Amino acid sequence: MIGLASDNLLGTVFGVYLARAKDEEIRRRKVASGGAVTALLTYALEKGIVDGVVAAKRTKGLEGQAVVAHNKKELLEAAGNKWSIVPFATRMKAKIEEENLKKVALVCLPCQAQFFAQMRDFPLLESDFGERIKYIVSLFCMGTFAFNAFLNYLRMKYNIKAEQIRDIHLKKDFLEIVYNGTKLDLPIEEVYSYLQTGCLVCTDYTGIWSDISAGFVESEPGWTVLMARNPKAEELIKSAEKEGYLELKEGSHVVGEILKKAREKLARAQQNMSYLL
Amino acid sequence: MNEFKSTLGHIPFESVTRIMDGAKLILQQEDGIVQDAFLILTAPLRGFEKLVIGKDPLFTIKAVMRICGVCHVAHANATAEAIESAVGLFPPRNALLVRELLGLVNRIQTHILPMVSTDMIVEERRSRLVSLIKLYGKVSDYLLKLGGGVTHPPYLTIGGISKVPKWSVLNHLKAKLPKIEEKWEEIKGVLLDEDNLTEIADELRTKIVRNEFLASNLFFGDKYKVSFKGIRTIPYWEYREEPGELVNEATVMVAFYKGKVVEVGPRARLMLFTPFRGVSLFGLYTARILEIDLAFKRIKEILSEINTKAPFRRQNMIFGSGKGIGVYEAPRGTLFHYVKLDGEGKISRLKIISPTMFNIPVIENAVKGLTVEAAEVAVKLFDPCIPCTTHVENVQKN
Amino acid sequence: MEKLKVLHVDIGSCEGCNVSILRALPKIQEFVDLDMKYLAKKTCARDKYDMVIITGGVCMNEPHIIEKVKSLREKTSTIVAFGSCATFGGILRFCRGGQEPRPDHRNFQPINSVVKVDYSIPGCPPTPQMVQSFFKFFVAGDKKRLKLFKVYADIKKLSGFDLIDDIVLTGLCIGCGACELSCPTQAIEMIDRRPNLIAEKCIRCGTCYVRCPRASQMLSMGGRK
Ligand SMILES: Cc1cc2nc3c(=O)[nH]c(=O)nc-3n(C[C@H](O)[C@H](O)[C@H](O)COP(=O)(O)OP(=O)(O)OC[C@H]3O[C@@H](n4cnc5c(N)ncnc54)[C@H](O)[C@@H]3O)c2cc1C
Ligand code: SF4
Ligand code: SF4
Ligand code: SF4
Ligand code: SF4
């Protein structure tokens, strides 16, 4: 049986900030919260700190595909959330090798952050590319959808067809589905069963293996929470502020809120494990 | 074992060498001169010939690579050829080229390891050999890019190469080659400089050993030049029956070709296919150096012959019953794989004759009459491929 | 700082793992004093070592090898099983004996079947860079990072088959593709966001399992297999 340690739920935290993009253009785009992730990475790209950003771009429907962005324009095209796991691994390797990128930043979910960080720390295979990953940015995560099932549910229950959906936003504790010019608010509870089973036993809310974690809290709408997990990450965030890419405020007061969410996720995982396994 | 007194004194190997656990070199000496030698391999027998029975050809090639983490490509190439000829498959030209190239890169790697073994180089100059480990890393990149891995390269498979190399990757590898060769030229200078060589090297130079040689080709291997039927193998303990306590733990077979002891390996290849005449034991050393030279030249040719637009693997492979032989010139010598497939295309028999099986009697004979120190070095120059011993049991005649 | 005294012992690997360790040498020399039979050392015969690294699996039909492994346990407080053969059995899992001249060599087991292992580093072979990282974290006492390797040390068998059984068939797979990327024999293919195991290509090295974030998260959270 699997027992879970509940200590140190948030991992190593060096600094917590509330951030948003200074650039109006970024904020106007359909960013997920404060657009801080996009702004931060734009900074890293434009200053040559990284030579490519691997992010997820929306393809058909609500799914995403791993793309390499080389500039702000390409980054903007990838802003906003994709609600499924984007199977990065193999495609990313091919991309990095093809373009011979030497220092990439990548945006991913906690589970993926764990994989990439483990690859970086423990290069078991000669074909690994961990040494080329400079920054791992993990989004907070409450789960990804088993997409076919979720869309099918929307169709059956609400008569919303996949091609009508323009966007999905995560708000407080409901999902806002934007379709056909109107909106539908779905309580998270209602859609839980359409999350991937694997997500229901996932214990990591913030991405403890990442360099930087990004998410939001209800009490500070319009802002992105950035958690720096090491000095290298801290420096990137600070200098992005200095160079005018990010608007930054101290964020340690929201840690409690994040921790609460993290506990909820852990509790969910424990509960699910007890009957799934 | 009355006439032997075994003293377990350690004779140090001042070097990086592949001779390690899993074998014993027992030298019987009189006044420091070797009278008789036993090279007894005791590494546990993992039994690859048996573990592939009933399995798919795709598993078989993955498995045989893992016979040896040093010359993995050799086993893969031999088994691929054997299975393909058993079912009448002809891999495309590109595949043959890539296989040959990977084999040569692997040959360079394998030859480098005993070179790092510094017995031949005087102490003061040994530090310069660290660049050999670096060279190992540089050539490894070719295996990684074209074979998918530095060790046990996964793209090597039945029917050809499973991943088509990108044109840009190939170009990049081509462009890098001259630099690597330059490095090698530098190291070669150190390895051959008379002033750097030890007294042992001098002793080996005076020891002429004339053997029968067996080799099938200078580079890849050619099964039509040699006869698999001409090989006979017997357990080591039948080849040398006494002393029982010593030989009975051997885990290896000894091979003879047409009833004779034959030497295989770099020297055999060069003797048979080039004007090279290194008849002394020192010739083992120079042969390896020369083979690295030749490998670089051939790699360059192959890189320009690979055509990324043409296929790398056969399509529509059908496996069924049949038998086939694969012969590949492994770094240490001629390697034979014989396979039989059953009606379902699964392996029903695999027989492997590895180069060291031929070389064991050659090695045991060659070191007679040498000083103990030189004998150890000579054994390492033959580079027996089964993990061998570092400690020499020094057995004196009563 | 005093260098870590480390002994490497091979008990019958294919040497791929040994070459990896050897290749890491220039990078670890600074803080590790390695006794390895490849190297220019007078002896490999200290009474005590800070760490013993073992490559290869144990041939259970050779009592002297079993004895040897047990004697190594006496020599050190930290045993590291290096490579899939030593950790989970790897290709040795397929051995069945019957081959001349020693048909009696039938059964091979990972090191932890014979003695307690402290860290297991799977891979076929693990890279020289892995050797380097491991020593870096070990010397720094980075418990968090070493934890996974500690957890694997108690596991005797791990492979693509277990990944399918434990993660995919239970529905826990999230479709990230890490396993596909990590398999050294290309035995895993993602089909419709779930891995498919090409059974005949799997050599049971366990790399996919330890790289699967779902699996490794559960293991590192204190889960047992
Ligand atoms: C599935 C999912 C669940 C989430 N759950 C929570 C939650 O429970 N609580 C919370 O606080 N935050 C959650 N987030 C994160 C949050 O919605 C925002 O992404 C985060 O606050 C960053 O906002 P931003 O405006 O700075 O991002 P942006 O500037 O819009 O940048 C987001 C970046 O993330 C990339 N991205 C988007 N989706 C994916 C994906 N699926 N895989 C990889 N990269 C992707 C985009 O390409 C873009 O580069 C979740 C995100 C996702 C994708
Ligand atoms: S909940 Fe966990 S497993 Fe699911 S997508 Fe998020 S981080 Fe990955
Ligand atoms: S794990 Fe792989 S490389 Fe290491 S000894 Fe076993 S087969 Fe060889
Ligand atoms: S599927 Fe691949 S990575 Fe997993 S155990 Fe098998 S060979 Fe190893
Ligand atoms: S690594 Fe694990 S979670 Fe990811 S695709 Fe493979 S089995 Fe699924």
Image (cartoon, rainbow, N blue to C red):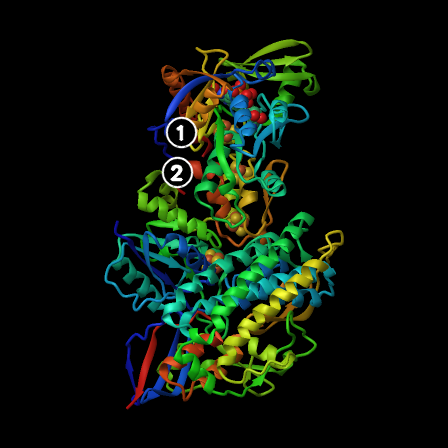
Give the residue drawn at x 43%, y 36%.
Answer: C217
Q: Are marks 1 and 2 on the same chain?
A: no
Judge the density around disc 2: few (<14), some (14-19), many (≥20) Cα neighbours within 10 Å. many
Viewer can see residue B353: no
**x%, y% of residue B275?**
63, 81
**x%, y% of residue C160?**
52, 47
To which chain does the residue with label 1 belong?
Answer: A
As drawn, which residue projects farthest toward the front? B195
Above or below, C87 against B41 in this view is above
**x%, y% of residue A25?**
60, 15
Residue with the mark numbered 1: A229
Residue with the mark numbered 2: C220
Asked whether, in this view, residue A228 is left or right of residue B335, the answer is left
Viewer can see residue A69: yes
As drawn, which residue projects farthest toward the top? A182
Give the residue drawn at x 50%, y 12%.
Answer: A222
Give the distance between the C-alpha atoms of the residues marked 1 and 2, in whole angstroms: 19 Å
